[in-house]
Image (spheres, helix red, strand yellow):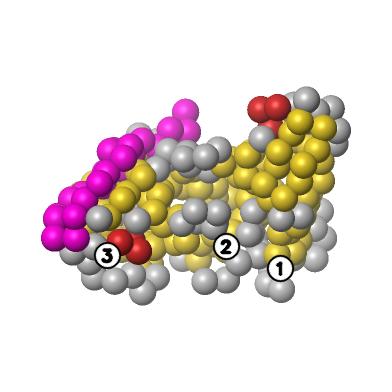
Amino acid sequence: DTEVTQTPKHLVMGMTNKKSLKCEQHMGHRAMYWYKQKAKKPPELMFVYSYEKLSINESVPSRFSPECPNSSLLNLHLHALQPEDSALYLCASSRRERMRETQYFGPGTRLLVL
Amino acid sequence: GQQLNQSPQSMFIQEGEDVSMNCTSSSIFNTWLWYKQDPGEGPVLLIALYKAGELTSNGRLTAQFGITRKDSFLNISASIPSDVGIYFCAGQLITGTASKLTFGTGTRLQVTL
C-alpha cells in the first residue's frame, strides 16, 4: 500500500480567510513533505518534516504554516494568501530502508485564492 | 529552485510507437525516480533507480541510472493511449533524516490512435 490521502480535493478561499490542508498516510513513513505546483511546472518543495520535526523550510512565506501533529498527519495552515498562491498543493511521504528512499505523492489539493 | 534538463519537452507519437526521454544534471544524485502525472492529479511513481548503471523495467517501461550518476533515461515500448500525461524525472539526495528531490522540467506525451 502506497497511499497518501489529501483533503480537500478543491478549495476556494478569499485573501482574508484562514483554511487548512490535510495530508494523511498510514505506511509508517517518517518523513512527510509539502510541495507547491503551478500549471505546466514541476513540483517545488516547501517543507520537510522528519520524525515529526520540521527539518527543511525552503524560505516559504509565513502565510503558510505547516504542522505535524503525529507521524501519520501533516497539515498546512493558510492565512492571508495572495492570488499568486493559487496552485496544486501536493503532500508526499517517504521511508528509508538501507539508504534507499522513495517519495510517494498524494492526489493534491487544488487551491484557488480570490 | 534548481531544475534538471529533461528532453524532449513534448512528444506527439502514434499508438504502438516506442518513446524515449532523458534527464541530465550537473550534480550527482543518490537516486533517480521517474513519475507520471495526469492533469489535476499527483505524480505517480513509475520506476526508482538506486545504483549507478542500474537498468530496471516495469512492464513496458525501462529506465536506467547513468554511470556518471548525473543522468537517467526512460523508455516506453509500444505506447498506448493511457500513456498520455506528463513524465517527470527526479534526482534525489538523501540528507540527514529526509530526502530532497530535484525535478526535471517534464515531458508531455500525447498519443494518437
Say if mark 3 contacts mark 2, CB within 8 Å: no
Tell whether label 1 touches label 2 (CB within 8 Å). yes
Residue sitting at the far front: A114
Question: Is A11 located above or below residue A36 in the figure?
Answer: above
The residue shown at (72%, 50%) is B10
Residue at 19% from the left image edge and 60% from the top image edge = A15
Boundaries of the magenta span: A1-24
Task: Check disc 1: other Cα within 10 Å, few if <14, some if 14-19, many if 20+.
Answer: some
As displayed, is residue A82 above or below residue B37?
below
Q: Residues within 10 Å of mark 3 (few under 14, many from 20)?
A: some
Left or right relative to A47: residue B18: right
Tell me how far mark 2 sits from mark 1, CA to CA.
10 Å
Q: Which mark is residue A82?
A: 3
Q: Amino acid at mark 3?
A: Gln
**Element under disc 2:** strand
Q: Which residue is mark 1?
A: B25
The quarter of the image holding the C terminus of chain A is bottom left
Residue furthest out toward the right: B17
Q: Is residue A73 left or right of residue B50?
A: left
Q: Which secondary structure class fits the magenta region best?
A: strand
Whether tag 3 and tag 1 are in contact, CB under 8 A, the answer is no
Q: Considering depth in this image, is A99 or B80 the residue closer to the camera?
A: B80
Q: Is residue B62 left or right of residue A86?
A: right
Tag nearer the camera, 3 or 2: 3
Classify mark 3: helix, strand or loop.
loop
